[in-house]
Image (cartoon, rainbow, N blue to C red):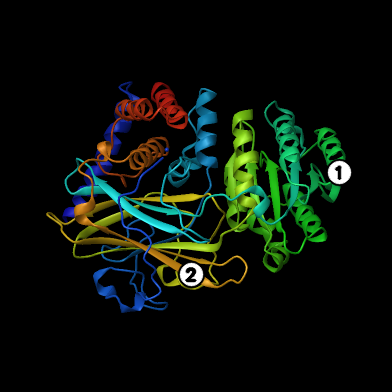
């Protein structure tokens, strides 16, 4: 088949690029052009055989490979707002080494950059679908953008009850680990509201609750002293830390508040239970009954990325990575407040590609977040938890029929109301004639997403899922041009990371 020959050509080119790199010739934001917002509550009126909105629960969607979806069918995944993979890759590059390919998750590179999607008026999501053509035959990049409402004034959110579980093992003595966590917690304590509460749990060989759930009002000095007194000890019994953290969170549970466990660790577990599934199974009752989610913050040049990511995924939460004070400020002063409030639980997305216009398509990344198509409307199946101020971007490589016209794809997002657990859906559509002529002259947001995805593909030794793959030096030029035109510091940081990777390769 022509599609198969095309993908073989992608893989051949990838192999040649790798060979070139080895021989010394070396080689993630913001407008959306798609339609947004029409509710899919009346989805049953659509003809699903044309690849339009998601089919009703139980419809046979056929077999599909985890990485090669059958054209004309569906792609379904749980929403993910993690960013740890990109930040950890930048840390590795800054240290003069390439990141381990197993730690490179393209969706986290893409979602590390600001996107200016339209926002919904209330809880839930807006849906933006746009795309642009590449120079590779009939291949395009299609961007599915989901956005929650903007972060409201701090006083309007529910109070927070945060249990910080802090790694004080010997490895945390390295500069940029426990000391950075202490500075970050100190700043955050000053910024939390009087009606918020915090608890502190530490773990090394064993776990200990050093501060039970304590209101900020009148107790800030006590909390600051507890943070200042933290000191490193011995081994890393992460399992004991998580278990004690959840027990402390349940003991200090506040009705009407947002209850969270925040794990701060290098995740280099070497004592006790070191398996994410087993660790979280021991606290599954607390997680499910009380809806306590886990926010993982990774630190350290040596970092147990796989364990932390698995913990967050299984714990209905998110991960971030910090290596310096700027990143810590962003995580603890900007990201964490967004995780305090929830606008959606168990959020999933499903994209239906039209077989009349689409020959082949591949979701870039989300390998650990794939959901069976028939489980899209099964609300017992876990999705992602998303708060206000978030955007989620999914990038697809799409091969259209030659001269394709008309409907291309419909994206549907489904989520549960955090309070009532009532399900809601929203959809967005893309027509073939809405594709921009070139990804490199498309909107800032689409270009940023493309550069981030191509960068992740290079670092992770991609399998040819992306069309028209540029060399790293060419990608660096695209990033430099975008950083110059936008005067964006985050895009400038991306360009510098690509330059560094190019030199190291």
Nearer-the-camera pick, 77 or 81: 81
| Front residue of this view, candidates 318 and 267 | 318
Q: Is residue 399 left or right of residue 206?
A: left
In this image, 93 relative to 432: left or right? right
* Rendered location of residue 493, percent (x, y): 46, 28
> Under tag 1, what secondary structure?
loop
Q: Is residue 41 visible?
A: yes
Compare residues 418 and 504 and report the one nearer the observer: 418
Secondary structure, mark 2, is: strand
Which residue is denoted by mark 2 in the rendering?
424
Q: Where is 234 relative to 414, above or below? A: above
Q: Name the quadrant of the C terminus.
A: top left
Q: Is residue 277 above or below residue 460?
A: below
* Vertical order, 169 against 389 (above or below): above
3D distance between C-alphas at marks 1 and 2 = 41 Å
Give how far across and how far down residue 504 sits, in percent. Answer: 43, 23
Residue in the picture at 55% in, 24% down: 95
Q: Residue 73's spot in the image, x, y percent?
A: 30, 66
Q: Quadrant of residue 441?
A: top left
| Residue at left offset 35%, top offset 78% | 44
- Quarter holding the N terminus? bottom left
For the residue pair 10 and 264, the one nearer the viewer reads as 264
- Kindly identify which numbered label has been placed on residue 265: none
Mark 1 or mark 2, earlier in chain:
1
Which residue lies under the disc numbered 1? 219
Q: Residues within 10 Å of mark 2 (few under 14, many from 20)?
A: some
| Observer able to see residue 322 | no
Label 1: few (<14), some or many (≥20) within 10 Å? Answer: few
Q: Residue at x 51, y 71 (%)?
A: 423
The image quadrant of residue 336 is top right
Left or right: where 259 falls relative to 314:
right
Q: Position of residue 412 (x, y in %)?
A: 39, 64
């Amino acid at each position: 088949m022509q599609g198969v020959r095309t993908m073989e050509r992608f893989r051949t080119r990838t192999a040649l690029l790798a060979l070139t790199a080895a021989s010394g010739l070396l080689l993630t934001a913001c407008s959306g052009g798609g339609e947004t917002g029409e509710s899919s509550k009346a989805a049953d009126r659509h003809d699903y055989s044309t690849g339009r909105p998601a089919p009703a629960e139980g419809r046979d969607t056929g077999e599909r490979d985890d990485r090669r979806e059958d054209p004309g069918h569906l792609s379904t995944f749980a929403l993910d707002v993690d960013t740890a993979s990109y930040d950890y890759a930048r840390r590795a590059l800054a240290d003069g080494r390439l990141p381990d390919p197993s730690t490179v998750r393209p969706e986290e590179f893409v979602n590390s950059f600001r996107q200016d999607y339209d926002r919904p008026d209330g809880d839930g999501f807006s849906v933006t679908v746009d795309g642009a053509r590449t120079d590779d035959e009939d291949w395009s990049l299609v961007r599915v953008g989901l956005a929650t409402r903007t972060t409201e004034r701090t006083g309007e959110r529910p109070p927070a009850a945060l249990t910080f579980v802090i790694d004080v093992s010997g490895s945390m003595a390295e500069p940029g680990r426990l000391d950075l966590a202490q500075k970050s917690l100190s700043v955050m304590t000053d910024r939390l509201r009087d009606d918020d509460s915090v608890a502190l749990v530490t773990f090394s060989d064993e776990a200990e609750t050093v501060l039970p759930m304590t209101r900020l009002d009148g107790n800030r000095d006590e909390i600051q002293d507890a943070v200042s007194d933290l000191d490193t000890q011995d081994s890393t019994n992460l399992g004991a830390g998580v278990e004690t953290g959840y027990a402390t969170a349940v003991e200090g549970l506040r009705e009407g508040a947002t209850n969270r466990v925040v794990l701060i660790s290098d995740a280099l577990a070497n004592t006790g239970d070191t398996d994410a599934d087993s660790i979280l199974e021991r606290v599954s009752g607390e997680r499910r009954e009380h809806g306590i989610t886990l926010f993982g913050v990774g630190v350290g040049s040596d970092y147990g990325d796989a364990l932390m990511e698995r913990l967050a995924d299984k714990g209905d939460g998110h991960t971030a990575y910090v290596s310096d004070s700027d990143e810590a400020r962003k995580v603890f002063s900007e990201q964490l407040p967004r995780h305090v409030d929830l606008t959606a639980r168990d959020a999933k997305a499903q994209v239906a590609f039209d077989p009349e216009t689409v020959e082949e398509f591949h979701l870039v990344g989300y390998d650990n977040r794939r959901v069976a198509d028939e489980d899209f409307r099964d609300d017992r199946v876990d999705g992602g938890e998303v708060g206000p101020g978030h955007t989620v971007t999914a990038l697809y490589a799409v091969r259209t029929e030659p001269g394709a016209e008309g409907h291309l794809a419909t994206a549907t997002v489904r989520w549960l109301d955090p309070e009532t657990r009532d399900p809601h859906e929203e959809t967005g559509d893309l027509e073939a004639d809405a594709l921009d002529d070139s990804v490199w002259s498309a909107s800032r947001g689409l270009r940023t997403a493309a550069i981030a995805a191509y960068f992740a593909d290079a670092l992770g030794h991609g399998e040819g899922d992306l069309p028209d793959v540029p060399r790293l030096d060419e990608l660096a030029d695209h990033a430099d041009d975008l950083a110059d035109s936008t005067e964006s510091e985050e895009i400038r940081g991306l360009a510098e990371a690509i330059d560094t990777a190019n030199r190291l390769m």
